[in-house]
Amino acid sequence: MVEELAKWRAEIDLIDNEIMKWLVKRFELTKKIRRYKTLHSLPVMDKEREEHIMREKIGSSGLPRKFIQDLYKIIFEESRRIQR
């Protein structure tokens, strides 16, 4: 039983590492977007895009709506912070 628990936790650790890797990649792309928006005098916030992403993820993930909203609120806030 303990071995099984350790195996599952090890799998979770691997998944968590992948999540962090993809978040780093996402925010690296956000820096490129910042340069583009600055060059083209575009606003940092794109409310329509954020709403579209939120609707898409809520509809396709199978995860609770509140969780998706909270998660993407944090991601969007960090993306906007990076772009300022």
Image (cartoon, rainbow, N blue to C red):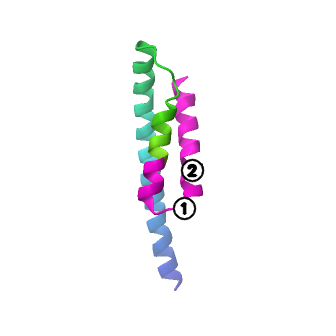
Residue that extends furthest to the bottom in the rendered view of this protein: 1
| Image point (50%, 69%), residue name | 9
| Residue receiving disc 1 | 64
Q: Position of residue 76 (x, y in %)?
A: 54, 38
Please provide percent x and percent y for residue 55. 47, 49
Residue 58 x/y as whole percent: 48, 54
Magenta span main SS: helix
Can you tell which mark lies on residue 36? Answer: none
Q: Which residue appears at 52% of the width and 33% of the height?
A: 47
- Magenta-highlighted residues: 55-84
Task: Tell me where residue 78 appears, x and y as whole percent.
Answer: 56, 36
20 over 36 or under it: above or below: below
Is 26 in the magenta?
A: no
What amino acid is found at the position of numbered circle 2 in the picture? Gln
Q: Is residue 51 above or below residue 63?
A: above
Q: Is residue 2 above or below residue 23?
A: below
Q: Which residue is mark 2?
A: 69
Q: Quadrant of the C terminus?
A: top right
Residue at position x 51%, y 78% from top?
5
Query: For residue 57: magenta?
Result: yes
Task: Look at 40% across and 39% down and name the residue there.
Answer: 25
Residue type, label 1: Pro
- Report helix, strand or loop for mark 2: helix
Label 1: which secondary element: loop
